[in-house]
Image (cartoon, rainbow, N blue to C red):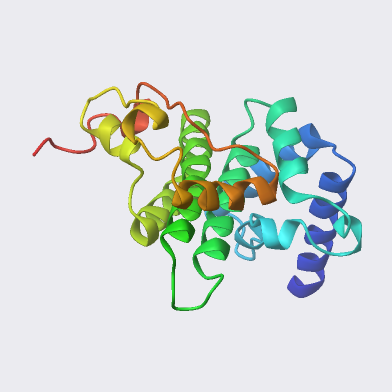
Amino acid sequence: MPQENQHDNLSKARMLLATRRFVKLDEWLLSLMRGWQNQTDTHSDYGLVLHPGTLIAGAENHTVDPLDILSDWAQQCPQSYHAHVLLGMFWHEQAWVIRNANGEHVEDSQWLGAQLCCDYAVLAFLRAIELHPRPTHAFRHLMNLSGGFGEPYWLRDLFAGKSPLPLHEKFNIAGSQVWQTGVGYLHAIGVEPATHWPQSLPAALQQTRKSR
């Protein structure tokens, strides 16, 4: 029975996403989230459903561009916690795809391309943290990203109480071959690099790190 319910939940989530019924999908995911966090649902599928690779799969979404549909969700529902968490997870996955493109040998341009994806991921996670009082997955994936790729320079600046400089002011690499190749990874996804950053942390992250 739990396996049958799991299939039904996945099909429901995928269909709501494919038909872009974002408000309905948000309401349903928040309901699943409450049951999962409060442990009132002993067979919760929340963790399974809340993953781009699971959600954007199956016959319902086989022609869907993940970035397009997740960005559309975030734009149509700017207060949606789940839209921003999933968008962050998508970008985190892209960072690993670029990082692992040539196996164990990683070019500087791959590291750069991965870091540029991480910028977008962290921006999405920070927005998600602003939007929910218990942003479990946003915290978890932000920590996982920082462990795998390190914190972006601008996030370190925010934790240190500084205003981060825009990318082009922080690094003079725009004309280099490494930059051009690294940015090419983002162009292949269909975007330009993010260049400007928040000037403060979400309230939940303020005062969480002592100055050294």
Left/right placement of residue 123 relative to residue 191 reads left
Q: Nearer the viewer, residue 55 or 187?
A: 187
Name the quarter where the N terminus is drawn: bottom right
Q: Residue at horizontal 51%, vertical 51%?
A: 182
Q: Is residue 58 left or right of residue 54?
A: right
What percent of the width, then of the height, locates residue 180? Answer: 53, 47
Q: Name the image quarter holding the C terminus.
A: top left
Residue 37, visible in the rendered structure: no
The image position of residue 44, as x and y in percent, is 64, 61
- Above or below residue 16? Residue 23 is above
Residue 171 visible, this orientation:
yes
How many numbered circles are shown? Answer: 0
Horizontal side of residue 170 vs 9, given as left or right: left
In this rendered view, identify the residue nearer to me: 197 or 25: 197
Residue 125 screen position, x and y as percent: 49, 40
Q: In this image, 170 relative to 82: left or right?
A: left
Farthest residue, direction left: 212
Establish if 196 lies above or below 102: above
Instruction: Choose between 142 and 168: the one closer to the eye.
Output: 168
Q: Position of residue 176 (x, y in %)?
A: 44, 45
Q: Write the residue at 52% across / 57% down.
A: 95
Q: Residue placed at 53% from the left, 41% from the top?
A: 120
Residue depicted at x 24% and y 37%: 208
